[in-house]
Amino acid sequence: MVKNKGKILVIEDDEQMVNFVKKVLEAHSYQVDSAPSAEEGLKKVKELSPDLIVLDVMLETRGEGFITAQKLKSTDPESEYREYSHIPILMLTAINAEMKFRYSPETDGEYLPAEDFVEKPVEPSELVQKVENLLASKAPS
């Protein structure tokens, strides 16, 4: 029996992309759950306490993923998501292609509190590598 390598929550409104991410990550022994909106995603974070979140930038609005990431990374003592702020976020986005912006965790880390970004369309091997890197960096030494 193959050991589960971790719980991944995919917050993405494109059902085809969700199916793609699930198929790729489940083939690598990850347990994958999903939510089609920011609101549902935030609820599932509380229910599941995932090991990693794959978060689309453009959900209900073009920047909804950014707002969701900021909520999830808040360390404000009053934040209802404070206890989840340690969970790595991999932003999944086509916003750079669609809006000609360039976002990266190195240059936009304060405004965009995500540990890494991956552009749509993504190659399966790149997705798995980014997930594995983020989970390895989160693991206790």
Image (cartoon, rainbow, N blue to C red):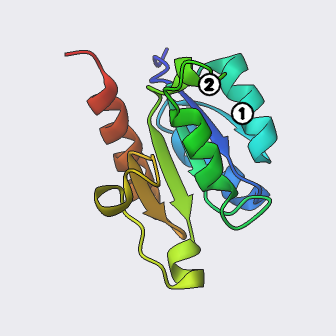
Identify the residue at horizontal 62%, vertical 25% (top origin).
81
Mark 2 is surrounded, within 10 Å at the Cα level, by few (under 14), some (14 to 19) or many (20 or more) other residues, namely some
Rendered position, 31 above or below 120:
above
Q: Which residue is mark 2?
A: 81
Question: Circle 1 sits on which residue?
Answer: 42
Left or right: residue 17 compared with residue 121: right
Q: Percent from the top left, x then y, of residue 123? A: 45, 64
Circles 1 and 2, Cβ within 8 Å, touching? The answer is yes
Establish if 129 lies above or below 92.
above
Quadrant containing the C terminus is top left
Q: Type of residue at label 2? A: Tyr
Question: What residue lies at 53% left-to-right and 82% top-to-bottom?
Answer: 97
In this rendering, the count of numbered labels is 2
**Residue 57, image quadrant:** bottom right
Tell me where residue 139 appears, x and y as whole percent: 30, 21
Helix, strand or loop for disc 2: loop
Q: Which residue is painted at 47% across and 53% down in the image?
A: 112
Q: Amino acid at mark 1?
A: Leu
**Image x and y of residue 44, in percent:** 73, 27
Q: Earlier in the sequence, mark 1 or mark 2?
A: 1
In this view, 128 is above or below 14: above
Q: Which mark is residue 16?
A: none
Please indicate whether residue 57 sits to the left or right of residue 132 in the image: right
Q: Position of residue 62 (x, y in %)?
A: 70, 68
What's the residue at 55%, 18% (across, down)? 77
- In this picture, residue 22 sits left or right of residue 87: right
Q: Is residue 63 above or below residue 48?
A: below
